[in-house]
Amino acid sequence: KDLYAIENGTIITPRTEMMFRGTSRREFSFTFTFIPKDSGETEIVHKIIKEFKVGMAPSFKVAGSTREMTIPDVFSIQYMHINGPNNYINKIGKCYLKTMDVSYGGDKFTTYNPSNGSGLKGAPPQKTTISLSFQELEIMDRANVLDGF
């Protein structure tokens, strides 16, 4: 074999066959850290976290003796720059929120003084980090990629 390869200047390689089984749905992860400066921003952070938690959860519908689950919210995610879309970053199709992790405090857990008039009970954390993992509903094909996805 080696002598044949040297004489002809070619190498015989073993055949590699593969079966294309398709592609999977794309996933996107984002991490945000919130450090509110006042009670108003603390309320906003609390509402953002609650909105994502509610959006990723289904509801139960009871119809007679059967329980059905509704579909969780669908999210539209877009990368922006100043007043418009950032076309240098790929588009993201409609997604659902697959996982959400919330971390309160950071290295050293510290809270602000308990808020009295805000309607919340307890002391709000000085730092909150959320990690969101989204998965697209559609499988992207070549036409989607050419369209910027």
Image: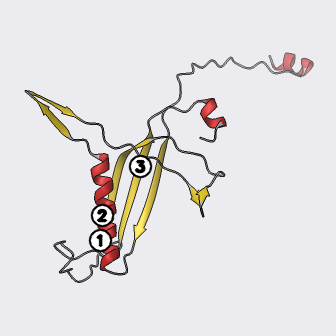
Q: Are marks 1 and 2 in contact (CB under 8 Å)?
A: yes
In the displayed structure image, the side of residue 75 where residue 13 appears, left or right: right
In the displayed structure image, the side of residue 52 where residue 144 appears, left or right: right
Report, in whole angstroms, how far the alpha carbon at label 1 lies from the one at label 2: 6 Å
Q: Residue lying at the far bottom in this picture: please name it.
A: 113
Residue 10, picture quadrant? top right
Helix, strand or loop status at disc 1: helix
Report, in whole angstroms, how far the alpha carbon at label 3 lies from the one at label 2: 19 Å
In the displayed structure image, the side of residue 137 where residue 38 appears, left or right: left
Q: How far from the left and from the top, in percent, is residue 101? A: 33, 56
The C terminus is located in which quarter? Answer: top right
Q: Which residue is mark 2?
A: 47
The N terminus is located in which quarter? Answer: top right
Q: How far from the left and from the top, in percent, is residue 18? A: 60, 20
Helix, strand or loop status at disc 2: helix
Residue 125, picture quadrant? bottom left
- Up-down: is 91 above or below 69? below
Badge 2 amino acid: Lys
Q: Residue lying at the far front in this picture: please name it.
A: 83
Q: Which residue is mark 1?
A: 43
